Every structure is written in C-alpha cells, then in structure tokens.
C-alpha cells in the first residue's frame, strides 16, 4: 500500500529545502553513508563496498558516483514531490537494482533514519523541527512508493527466473578477452538457467576470505544455444571484480541474484 501523499505544507517545506540541500549535497550524502555503515554494518554486504572505500571509487566531476546517484535522487524527489508520477521511470530503474541486492521493506526505516540524521548533522539548526517532520513524512511516502514497486517486481522477476533471492551457480564456461575482461557462464544445479535478456544484470555475492562480504553487479551478455547465463566481468581494480577475474575458475560456485533490469 502506498502511504498518503504528503500534505501541501509538507510539499512546500520540502521544496524550500532544495537550495540548501543542493549546496551541501556531497557532505550530507557522505555523512548518510557514514551513519548507515556505522549504525547498521550488517547492510554493508548488500552494497558494493569497493565504491565506498576510496581508492577505486569512480568519480564524476570529483564526486564519488555512489554519492552523486543518491544525492541526485534526493534532490530530484524534493523538486518533484508533488508529481511523483514523473519519477516513476527512475523509481522503477532503481527498484530493479534494489531487488537485485535483496533490499527489504523493513530496511527503508533504517535508510530514512540515517538520511534525516545526516541532514541534521550537517545542516544543524537550519533543520528546524518543521523541516525535520516534513522530510520524515516525505521520505515515508517515497519509501512506500519504492516498497510497492519492489514487491511487484520481486514477484515478477522471481517468477521469470524460477527462483528468488540468491542461488549458488557453478561456473561452467569461461572466456577471456584481450583487454583482460572475462565472460563467465553460470548454471544452477537446482534451477538450471534463469530467463534473461539484453540490458539485464545480476548481483553477485562476493564471499572471499580476508575481504568484507560485498556485492557487485555484472551485466548478462548473451543467450547462446544452450541458454546458459553469461555474465561480463570487466577488467577493473575493484577487489570484488578482481576476485571474479583472478580467483574464480571453472567449477567454482558463486551466488547470484535473479536477472534484473529492463530487457532492452
Ligand atoms: C527512498 C529510499 C531510497 C532511495 C531514494 C534510494 C536510491 C538509490 C539510488 C539512486 C541508487 C543507485 C541506482 C543505480 O546505481 O542504478 C541506489 C542503489 C542502491 N540502494 Fe538504494 N535507495 C533507497 C533505499 C534503499 C534501501 C532501503 C536499501 C537497503 C539497504 C538500499 C540499498 C541500495 C543498494 C545496495 C544499492 C546499490 C549501490 C551500491 O552497491 O553501492 N537503498 N539506491
């Protein structure tokens, strides 16, 4: 069930915070991730932690990509809070990513708590009680839109794949490209091969001794005659990707999600 739409007062207050949020966006979102990973470290395993550790973090205009993506979503929501239907295509794209990472409805409160706390930590007295309450209501509404979309998507994608969550798959084929990237062909003993198409990806669970459990997304590349699931592993310095390139071999077993992302 989608929560009641925010009141006109809440809409006005949230919109009025766009300039101050935009000005301090990197600080607020960076603090959000600090709050999240220190308060709820168990959530780390669903994120690509290589992108939150510095070093290999991909930057766009000097801003880590992860910070830019969430920051962009927050600003875009604040600007369009009175016409959420305009955001639905973006919500759907993000929801595919969430489903792939096993995000649950119960986790939304944790994200909301850490985001609101980050706004207060960074913007201090500019976040009055009225602003705090307006954002809490606005976040609750957005969360319910996501949860609704993700409940439907989980059902749809699991039915198509023939399983839900993460299943162990064996590496049954491997091809190496000249540029150091690889393609791995995966098959589940229990469920065979999930249906998948161009433009989709799976989340791969990385469990390696000495490395914090993490996940990474890999594009599915083609359907061959045997209809196995191929994933493309680009040459990269990220530790999770290096694990797939350097350690995983024929016969290795890795856990993967259902194929997600809109088929092109
Ligand atoms: C209304 C709340 C939320 C918003 C606006 C939001 C927004 C986003 C955005 C914009 C992305 C990037 C999408 C992409 O790369 O294609 C993303 C990715 C992700 N989100 Fe959310 N999200 C929300 C709630 C949650 C919750 C509750 C969780 C639970 C842990 C979560 C976990 C993730 C994960 C694991 C990723 C993948 C990014 C990574 O590996 O670092 N999100 N989200």
Image (cartoon, grey):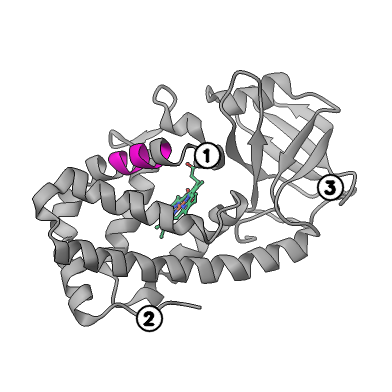
Indicate the quadrant containing the C terminus: top left, top right, bottom left or bottom right: bottom right
Which of 61 and 166 lies nearest the eye of the viewer?
A: 166
Q: Earlier in the sequence, mark 1 or mark 3?
A: 1
* Residue 179 in sight here: no
Q: Which residue is mark 2?
A: 4
Camera-side mark, 3 or 2? 2
Q: CA distance from mark 1 to mark 2?
A: 31 Å
* Residue 196 in sight here: yes
Give the image quarter of residue 142: bottom left
Q: Earlier in the sequence, mark 3 or mark 2?
A: 2
Q: CA distance from mark 3 to mark 2?
A: 47 Å
Q: Is residue 34 magenta?
A: yes
Which of 79 and 11 lies nearest the eye of the viewer?
A: 11
Q: Residues within 10 Å of mark 2 (few under 14, many from 20)?
A: few
Q: Is residue 170 magenta?
A: no
Read off the magenta span: 30-37
Q: Give left or right: position of 106 versus 73.
A: right
Q: CA distance from mark 1 to mark 3?
A: 37 Å
Q: Which residue is mark 3?
A: 224
User: In x, y percent, where is residue 7?
Assistant: 25, 80
Q: Residues within 10 Å of mark 3 (few under 14, many from 20)?
A: few
- For the stretch drawn in magenta, the main secondary structure is helix
């Amino acid at each position: 069930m989608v929560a009641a739409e925010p009141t006109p007062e809440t809409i006005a207050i949230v919109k009025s915070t766009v300039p101050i949020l935009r000005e301090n966006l990197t600080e607020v979102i960076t603090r959000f991730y600090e709050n999240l990973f220190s308060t709820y470290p168990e959530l780390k395993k669903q994120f690509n932690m290589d992108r939150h550790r510095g070093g290999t973090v991909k930057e766009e205009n000097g801003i880590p990509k992860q910070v830019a993506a969430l920051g962009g979503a927050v600003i875009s929501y604040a600007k369009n809070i009175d016409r959420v239907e305009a955001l639905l295509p973006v919500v759907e794209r993000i929801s595919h990513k969430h489903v792939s990472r096993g995000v649950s409805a119960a986790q939304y409160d944790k994200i909301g708590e850490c985001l609101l706390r980050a706004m207060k930590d960074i913007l201090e007295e500019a976040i009055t009680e009225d602003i705090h309450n307006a954002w809490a209501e606005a976040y609750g509404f957005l969360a319910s839109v996501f949860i609704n979309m993700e409940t439907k998507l989980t059902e749809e994608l699991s039915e198509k794949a023939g399983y839900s969550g993460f299943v162990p798959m064996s590496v049954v084929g491997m091809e190496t490209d000249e540029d150091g990237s690889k393609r791995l062909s995966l098959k589940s003993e229990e469920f065979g091969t999930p249906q998948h198409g161009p433009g989709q990806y799976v989340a791969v669970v990385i469990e390696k001794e000495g490395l914090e459990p993490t996940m990474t997304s890999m594009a599915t590349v083609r359907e061959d005659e045997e209809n196995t699931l191929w994933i493309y592993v680009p040459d990269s310095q990220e530790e999770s990707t290096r694990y797939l390139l350097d350690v995983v071999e024929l016969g290795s077993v890795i856990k993967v999600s259902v194929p997600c992302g809109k088929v092109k």
